[in-house]
Image (cartoon, rainbow, N blue to C red):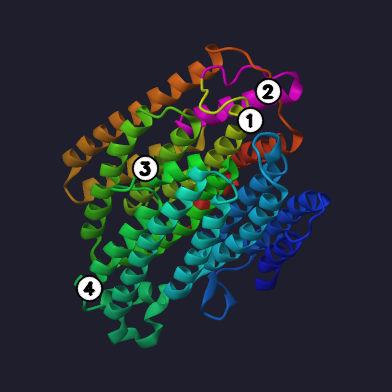
Amino acid sequence: MLELLLFPAFIIFGLSFIKSDKAKRLLAFVSFLILIPTVKLISLPKPFHLFKDYLVVDDLNAYILFVSSIVGIGVTLALMTLDKHVKVSKNAYRRFYRFFAIFWIGLIFSILSNNMGIYWIGLELATLSTVYMIKTNHSTAAYKEAWNYMIVGAIAISLILFGIILIYASAKPILGEDAMNFNLLLAHAKEIKSSFLFELGFATVSVGMFVKMGFFPMNLWLANIERASFYPVAALFSGILESAIIIGFFRFSKIAMEINYDHLFTFVFIYTILTIFIVSFLIYRAKDFMRLFSLSGIEHMALIALFWVSGGTFAALLHFGAHAFLKPALFLSTGVLESNGKYKIAGALKGYKGKKGTIFWFLVSLFLLAIISLPPSPMFFSEIYGFGAMIKVAKSGDNLLSMMAAILILLILLSVIFYKFVEVYQSMKYEGKVYEKKVYVTELFSLIIFGISLIILITSPVMNYLRGIS
């Protein structure tokens, strides 16, 4: 099974050296092969040991890998028409696919890892390959931001590594060399005597992960990078790379819940609220699509983390799936929306002709309204369940009034974001001049895949599957 998971990535890597234009179509087709083993993993009895006790499949990582594979297919389809919207050389095309293959291998190891060391190696591999994907845009801004990402990524990944070392040291007296194993750490968490050392390690790991997702205090670096790179890179960041980061947070926080739940909740609660507070006003001041969508992604990842530590596993996973489909869809749409001039929000949804144009602006409109949690968006349901989980936690700890006040503040901040997106949508639809814009079949097909995935996400079988993940 591991060979089947890695095989498409090796094919893509090999094909990226072929200079024929036909290879571009073949590469997009090969990306569909990624979906086959991920579907198989969902149907297998869990836990399934993919490689000894190092790579273990459970319901959580099978779901996240499946969602990521759909995003990967959508991105490769949109890549086929990248040169129709921006200036990109054939060599840059091939380089992008080459590092996408490496990126996917790192992602597989991170998501499926049952070992803290392997998780870190996979995350580092995905991070380094992303640096080169940013540089496929041969511009001064992209080169500068690639270096910035290298620096910020190095800081974040170093924090994660140092935190892992501290967690390993706290559990080594009882588990020995097996203290790197996530499942064993969870099973023996209550036996760890050096709880302070573990909590210090968890806090360090969490800060590293939060930095990589653009949380406080480094809120702007992610938006700057995604603005400077090609829009498929931004789609990979929001839909796939953040998946590998958030599953690490899920794993570490489950163990931390067993050590001291109150400390965990307080730490994450303060961090996420502070992040959303800052990001909401940055979103309000956003002047272009890429920054708007990028900053919105930080807000949603903060909500996912908050819902998760509040005990709202279902809410967090539903919100995660919705974000993973919606945000790449919006980033890939940016390639069409900005194709007649960057930063032009006014009139961006005007000028599309024919059936393809009508379907495009209709889908983008739905995605824009869904990302701000208007029903029947999956985010509408996930936020209801998420806030419900927060209230339930407060009632069990006699902190109901404080939690209600915090939720009120959150709703005010989310209202600021809601207002900004509605204002942007109105400007896109009703203001500005009409410029004729062209939509291509492959990028439209990519958006349709994301749209169908969102609908499937709120069907009973999928929601029951998510409820069953503990």
Q: Is residue 368 magenta?
A: yes
| Residue indicated by mark 1 | 336
Q: Contact (CB < 8 A) between labels 4 and 3?
A: no
| Residue indicated by mark 4 | 197
Q: Amino acid at mark 3?
A: Leu
Which residue is located at x 21 percent, y 58 percent?
262
Residue 431 in picture, x, y percent from top left:
52, 12
SS category of the residue bearing label 2: loop
Q: Contact (CB < 8 A) between labels 4 and 2?
A: no
**The C terminus lies in which quarter of the figure?**
bottom left
Q: Amino acid at mark 4?
A: Leu
SS category of the residue bearing label 3: loop
Q: Which callout, 4 or 2, points at the residue further toward the start of the chain?
A: 4
Q: Which callout, 1 or 4, points at the residue further toward the start of the chain?
A: 4
Q: Nearer the viewer, mark 4 or mark 3?
A: 3
Towards the viewer: 420 or 257: 420
Q: Is the residue marked by circle 4 packed among few (<14), some (14-19), or many (20+) residues within 10 Å?
A: some
Highlighted magenta segment, given as a residue range: 346-373
Q: Is the residue marked by circle 2 packed among few (<14), some (14-19), or many (20+) residues within 10 Å?
A: some
Q: CA distance from mark 1 to mark 3?
A: 24 Å
Label placed on residue 437: 2
Asked if residue 159 is positioned above or below residue 452 in the image, the reply reads below
Residue 5 in picture, x, y percent from top left:
66, 66
Left or right placement of residue 469 versus residue 402 in this view: right
Q: Which callout, 1 or 3, points at the residue further toward the start of the chain?
A: 3
Q: Amino acid at mark 2?
A: Lys
| Residue indicated by mark 3 | 220
